[in-house]
Amino acid sequence: MNTPEALKNIRVVLCATAHPGNIGSAARAMRTMGITDLALVNPQRYPDPQTQWFAAGAVDVLESARVCATLEDALEGVSFAVACSARRRDIAVPLTDVRSAAQEAVAQAQQQRVAFVFGNETSGLSNDEVSRCHLLASIPVDPAFSSLNVAAAVQVFCYELRMACGAALPEERPPLLAAINDVEAFYRHLETTLVEIGFLDPRQPRKLMQRLRRLFGRTRLQVEEVNILRGILSGLTHPQPRRSSKDEK
Amino acid sequence: MNTPEALKNIRVVLCATAHPGNIGSAARAMRTMGITDLALVNPQRYPDPQTQWFAAGAVDVLESARVCATLEDALEGVSFAVACSARRRDIAVPLTDVRSAAQEAVAQAQQQRVAFVFGNETSGLSNDEVSRCHLLASIPVDPAFSSLNVAAAVQVFCYELRMACGAALPEERPPLLAAINDVEAFYRHLETTLVEIGFLDPRQPRKLMQRLRRLFGRTRLQVEEVNILRGILSGLTHPQPRRSSKDEK
């Protein structure tokens, strides 16, 4: 899948980021998911070589990143904004999880620009910042250890945005299954062989064949596999004399 | 949600990790999602202070982490293993995406131990390592920039594992809606007021009231909000004389 159109309308806004490495990691996280519009509100150390190191090649995101003085500036041109925060507030912004927020954002981003807003590593987003957004979205975390790194959070949000665009792995062509009649012929061959070698007593079959059918049925035998299995069965009952070393030459 | 039982049966295996910071970030990523069983196969620099820095407090994960000489050792006691890799192979391990893999793994982890295996930052997993696993799972990435950091990949997998356990945000009690009759009384009040101030001509209403109903209907008015709105309407038509400064004392 190339970059879905909706992802071109998604902006990531990082507010008051303290560590320049996190800005680089966030840029890399965005870029892997096909999101490239980054705005930085009052980054504490920027530019900084660490940002480049952690971006690991996602330099196009950094080169086009805008540094803004206020969140208002960073939301210029944006119609729908999602505050990304683990902390709940007693303010009137509906709370949702990252998956639902991504789905709603991608629907909006078909037509309009959408922003995801992330706060400072320690203090997060202020209530004033959250109240400028339409949704407050959280990643479910272990309540005993909720310290999610900001770039890791950006990674999860951008991943969900790409998934919400219907990102799927390119389809694999399913393997060719053996014809049912060929598989039945294998079962008959198997049964005959098991009787021949004395493993199956036709007078006391004890559901052995049903069990073997269940085993092989689950694997959905392929053409070549049926040939291999029948070759093994033939080998069991009609062993070929080992070729002499003269023949091998 | 506290730690679901299934997550206690999930092991993360990092093979030949080059950067100690990535081990720390991966430990932190695991811990935020409630996963704590970590095995390290031949880490290139370990222990190392960087690991602790990047773990940001997820020290319990590091303290119980096992260092193994081979993948075989790291998979001790594991019944179901998922190879996590962006690279496709021409080997007979079914390919799936991270979400489906997480769902299958959580189902298995109700009863048995499950491992997610991640490769080296540069070379990934070898075909031999992948072929010891039951599934090959990938995170969908932008094909033009597929360089996902290993700890970021661990974050996405662990997030999907937690989601697959039915992780949901604790339910919010929905706000109390105003009674329908009170909302109707507000609409009547609004209409009367709009006629009174000359904004609505009863002879040419032009669907104004339907439009306003649609607007307020979408917001699902709450009790207090209806009171506020009716207060505003009363204020518009029966303005209160501003209290004198004497009254305010």
Image (cartoon, coloured by chain):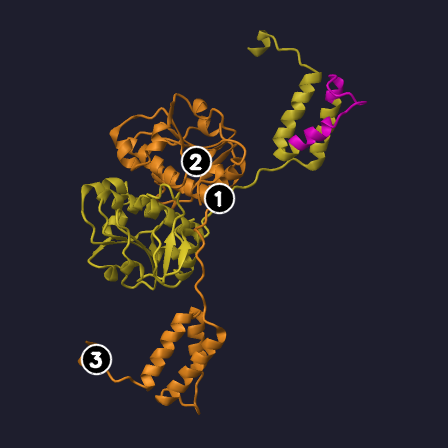
Chain colours: A yellow, B orange
Query: What amino acid is found at the position of numbered circle 3 in the picture?
Result: Asp
Marks 2,1: beta carbons within 8 A: no
Residue contact at pointers 2 and 3, CB within 8 angstroms: no
User: Where A222 falls versus B244 (above or below)?
Assistant: above
Question: Which of pointers 2 and 3 lies earlier in the amino acid sequence?
Answer: 2
* Amino acid type at image mark 1: Ala
Q: Earlier in the sequence, mark 3 or mark 1?
A: 1
What amino acid does circle 2 point to? Cys
Q: Are marks 2 and 1 on the same chain?
A: yes
Q: Which residue is mark 1?
A: B164
Q: In the rendered view, would you say B184 is above or below B110?
A: below
Q: Which residues are magenta?
A: A193-215
Quadrant for residue B107, please give it.
top right
* Chain containing mark 1: B
Q: Which residue is mark 3?
A: B247
Please indicate, yes or no, whether residue A75 appears anywhere in the rendered image: yes
**Location of residue B30 by image quarter:** top left
